[in-house]
Amino acid sequence: MARDDIVVLGAGIIGLNVALELSRRGYGQHVTVIAEHLPGDESIQYTSPWAGANFSGISGSDANALRWDQLGYKTMMSLIDAGTEEAKYLSKTQSTEYWDLAPSPDKVNSMKEYLRDLVLIPSFELPRGVAFGIKFTTVTVNAPAHCKHLMSLLSESRYGNVQFIPRKVAKIQDSFLQNTRIVFNCIGNAASVLPGVADSKCYPTRGQIVLAKAPAVNVNMMRHGMDYETYIIPRPDSEGTVILGGYLQPGDYTSQTRPEETESILRRTAGLLPTLNNGETEILRVAVGLRPSRKGGARVELEIASQGKAIVHNYGAGGTGFQAGMGMAHDAVDLAGDILKTLGNKSKL
């Protein structure tokens, strides 16, 4: 057994979920995570800490997206129900979501299969300009705290003492250490430029958010527009802070915040939830994140390298990493099954 039999490249929510899935299956003692940025860091190139984050209907309606959503939702709900330590920064939250253009029948039928307390809002109750709406129990996530918490748990002996190394690799091949048999490539936006990957389908989707203190807000609300995205997401265990957003700007790398976008966010979110105008809302910070998007959807794929080694690519989730990440991790680890079986010395959680 070697600590570097398995390398997870990237420590955003996608990479952390892969490390967690490996630990659950008993391979934690074989895992090293290599990442330019680790939980607690702040960089425009490190997307996860800037996320909302919640479970929502924003994802696509292709078979993979629907399956990853369902698995992610069910897993997060089960963790909350069981009161596990992994669910410390997850919370069940009542949610209302509106679409200006109705989602596909496949999307609606899939949501009906698993969303808890789902209600389709009658058309006469929908706001002007809204074509479809639902209410259900969602999961909201304190994104930066959750990522730091997962890294802390994974570093414990019961999770296999997963090792975290802060390092930027020059090419994908550099992530193979002395004993590495398999690399899980979870590099997010870097997938478009990293030699050995250089996926031309990848691009950033810029988002600007407002972090605010709004203790009266305890619901999740979203409106999916034709060319905008409005959302209000309370952060669990955060002393009443909420994320207000936002924007979906494909191909925009701008890291600076734009005052006019902040004004638009505050106007749109208050229109969606008037409670924000109660005089208690306090702006704490305005920030920008770059969602790691990919044409055609996320890539979860096995690539056989030389000498019996392999890479499992797992990136391109866009704005759905927190809700789809657990499902993507499940598939990614399954793809590596044949190699993982040769490692032995498993100790499941």
Image (cartoon, grey):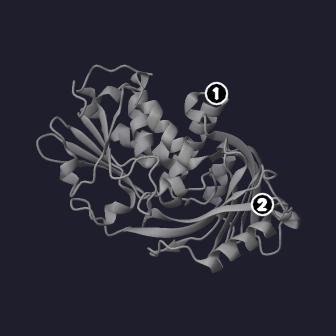
Query: Residue visible at 59% across and 27% down?
Result: 84
Q: Is residue 168 above or below residue 245?
A: above
Q: Amino acid at mark 2?
A: Thr
Residue closest to the far right: 124
Quarter where residue 339 is shown? top left
Q: Which residue is mark 2?
A: 281
Disc 2 to disc 1, C-alpha distance: 31 Å
- Above or below residue 225? Residue 115 is above
- In the drawing, does residue 137 fall left or right of residue 50? right
Q: Which mark is first along the chain, 1 or 2?
A: 1
Give the quarter of the image for residue 124: bottom right
Residue closest to the eye, 203 or 285: 285
Question: Viewer-nearest of labels 2 and 1?
Answer: 2
Residue type at the position of mark 1: Gly
For the point 66% across and 48% down, the residue is 235
Residue at (69% x, 71% y) in the render: 265
Q: Position of residue 27 (x, y in %)?
A: 34, 28
* Residue under numbered circle 1: 83
